[in-house]
Image (tube, helix red, strand yellow):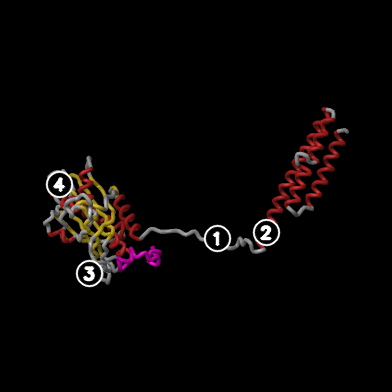
Amino acid sequence: MTAEDASSNISDLQSRALTELETLQDARRLEDWRVVYLGRKGKLTQTLRTLGSLPPEQRREAGQAANRAKTTLEEAYDNHLKTLEEASFATSSTKGRLDVTLPGWPVLRGGLHPTTQIVREICNAFASMGFQVVEGPEVESDEYNFEKLNIPKDHPARDMWNTLWVDYTGIQDEHSVLLRTHTSPMQARIMEKMDSKPVRVIVPGKCYRYEATDATHEWHFFQVEGLAVDKGITFADLKGTLYEFARLVFGQNRKVRFRCDYFPFVEPGAEMSIDCFLCDGQGCRVCKKTGWIEVLGAGMVHPKVLEGVGYDPSVYTGFAFGMGMERMAMLKHGIEDIRLFYSNDLRFLKQF
């Protein structure tokens, strides 16, 4: 056999294989075709083995023809297999087993609770002014919740906080461990632990009070406490900081008003109001026709509080403020009943 005879045989084999391939409409028969022509014992492989009897100068030419035929048949096999798979997919779709025009199942997505949203918004506002966000324990001691905040046991100001006391085994005084009534205990804890000054912190957290619930009161709620201590801090710094906060959270055109108020751990104390963002100070049901909405309490840190944590009040001064998160969310979104926040009613929560 010569190289021309071998090339002719390979060409005939390729033609027969391609002609037979065009008639195949079944994946199983296509696999049989691959085994017959391209398998380890297939016709093309057997033809390649006969090339060894050719003279060396003819063997190369015949080998190249065989390799070209093998490549052609493998590509034809792959293309035909892809065609059969696409036809099978289209057939199954038309039979109703898969309708690619239907939308997929929606991915259920959760959302942040409205209280969490307002907490993050307020913390971000103060963080932009250099405050650090810290957290504290919800189960507190009487010492930090009251004593270190200038509220001794016989002080009438304790009536402002309806306390939930904790029955803690091993404590002789039954009124020494409690669920914190405000986030202000962190004022003392932070100043005690801060080796370097100044102090700039914002403290979000949950608080608890033993009181009846109604549209404006809950027995558990979120507060955000703020504290700044350094040399030379004045009431002007307090006003400027809270004014910037009001503009960041409630709009750039907000006005603020400070009026005297009493809190045992600050002196002087004040409550801050903003002009009503619904009526622009003209008077409506939200601001009770006054044009102003009270949003938080604040004041300069009381000298006794500074002394209690080892600060010299003749050298260091500071200011503190606190606000209820649910109240802030109610004002911002026009919510009329605080109990909705914790009723787990998805009809309410999905609005946020």
Between 65 and 129, the one lying in front of the other is 65
Give whichever of 298, 343 is nearer the camera. 343
Label 3 and label 4: CA atoms lie apart by 40 Å
Quote the CA–CA distance across marks 1 and 4.
63 Å
Q: Which residue is disc 3 drawn over?
A: 290
Q: What's the CA distance linking mark 2 and mark 1?
A: 19 Å
The residue shown at (62%, 62%) is 99
Tell me the distance, in whole angstroms, between the alpha carbons under discs 3 and 2. Answer: 70 Å
Q: For the residues labelled 3 and 2, say whether their Cβ atoms are less than 8 Å apart.
A: no
Q: Earlier in the sequence, mark 3 or mark 4?
A: 3
Q: What's the amino acid at mark 2? A: Ala
| Residues under numbered marks 1 and 4 in contact, where contact means CB atoms less than 8 Å apart | no
Q: Is mark 4 on a helix, strand or loop?
A: helix
User: Is residue 60 left or right of 281 when viewed as pictured?
Assistant: right
Q: Identify the amino acid type marked 3.
A: Thr
Nearest the viewer among 326 and 229 is 326
Q: Is mark 2 on a helix, strand or loop?
A: helix
The disc label shown at residue 308, or none: 4
How many neighbours does mark 1 have within 10 angstroms: few (below 14), some (14-19), or many (20 or more)? Answer: few
141 over 282 or under it: above or below: above
Instruction: Specify the farthest residue to the front.
Output: 170
Question: Is residue 237 visible to us here?
Answer: no
Indicate which disc, 3 or 2, sits on the residue closer to the N terminus.
2
> Which residue is situated farthest in the top direction here?
56
Along the line of sight, the residue nearer the viewer: 343 or 87: 343
- Write down the residue under mark 2: 90
Q: Can residue 335 be seen in this view?
A: yes
How far apart are the alpha carbons under marks 4 and 2?
A: 80 Å
- Give above or below for 15 relative to 345: above
